[in-house]
Image: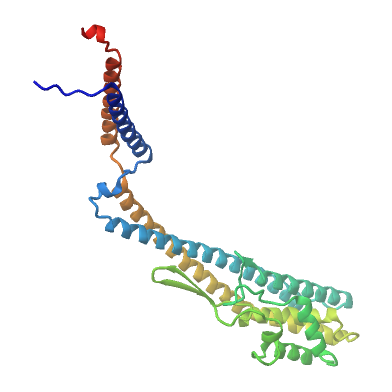
Amino acid sequence: MTVQSIGDQARAFAMQAASSRIKTTLATLTAELSSGEVADLGARLGGNTQHLAGIESRLAMLTQLQGNADEAAAQTKAMGDALSAVQGVAEGLGQSLYLEPSLVTDSLMATRSAQAAMDLQAAVGHLNGSVGQRFLFSGVESDTVPLTSADNILAELTSRVTGLTTAADIAQAVSDWFDAPPGSNGFADFAYQGGAGGQQTRIGESTTVTLTTTALSPSIRDSLKGLATAALLDRGALAGDSNEGRKLLRLAGKSLLDNSPALIAEMSRVGYAQQVIASTRTQGDAEAATLQTARNTLREADPFATSTAINDAETRLQTLYSVIGRLSQLKLANYL
């Protein structure tokens, strides 16, 4: 009869290898139980990972689109806030200039004109706002500040109305400058520094939002026109002619009030874009949640099966240690 045996050193290496395998298995099972996902995904799916890859790819696309939607939502909210601020300033000053019966003293006229200059500066500041390093009202050139400063606008208008002696002529000159088409050295060339087209953002698989509102939009331009017209008295226009100065302020006030519906309509367009963005974000969140559930189902480890496997691995490890302990106590004297 042939007896097969191995030496003590070889047996030690064999026991060490067996212990290492069981410990590796135990570590893998513990990681699966804590993370809830299987370690060997290929074995779990039988090598067919195409469906999971499709889910992962679509989730990545949805994540990018949701990021675009979040950015567009922040941008439209800031645009709505800016337009609301401009509308509030323009309507408040317009009512004071056109409807205030006490606008008869030179000091009050000077106060209102100075207020108009400050309101123009505030309006330009709102329109020059930015979100995420993108200027809100610059159109396609979102990396460029849309408007020059209010002081530059008033300085340019002051030079253009110098020598005019009636409120009607000054109001017409200001209106012509603001309404001049591009290339005519008017507002579009001197004051507006953005682009002509609107900003387009893809926020859904088949949804794109185009924000066409810029500082060159007629309703915004007319608001600035009314504020600038009233501010010219503070820059020395019609000096010494209180009657014509009063007429100019009332013309400016009427212009601001007449433009209020158009500015509100512009705000409504931005509000509609916000509504589309919110609806698309909700749809995207729902689809992403469904896909994440499907992905988790493919990747998840059965906690009960994993716990059973852990117990089995622990039992095998304890048995191995018991065998190693008993073998380490063998002596030649006991054998003999």
Q: Quadrant of residue 196?
A: bottom right
Residue 185 seen in this snapshot? yes
Residue 230 seen in this snapshot? no
Query: Which residue shows up at 78% across the image and 71% down it?
Result: 118
Query: Which residue shows up at 75% across the image and 72% down it?
Result: 121
Whole-percent x, y for residue 19 in the image: 31, 28
Q: Left or right: where does residue 11 sit relative to residue 128?
A: left
* Count of numbered tags: 0
Residue projecting furthest to the left? 1
196 relative to 135, above or below:
below
Q: Quadrant of the C terminus?
A: top left
Q: Quadrant of the N terminus?
A: top left
The image's colouring method is rainbow
Q: Quadrant of residue 189?
A: bottom right
Residue projecting furthest to the right? 240
4 relative to 133, above or below:
above
Q: Nearer the viewer, residue 23 or 51?
A: 23
Query: Which residue shows up at 89% across the image and 85% down it?
Result: 239
Whole-percent x, y for residue 94 in the image: 72, 76
Q: Left or right: where does residue 251 sit relative to residue 219?
A: right
51 relative to 300, above or below:
below
Whole-percent x, y for residue 51 in the image: 27, 58
Q: Left or right: where does residue 95 sit relative to residue 137?
A: right
Q: Left or right: where does residue 284 sit relative to residue 138?
A: left
Q: Nearer the viewer, residue 272 or 294?
A: 294
Whole-percent x, y for residue 21 in the image: 30, 33
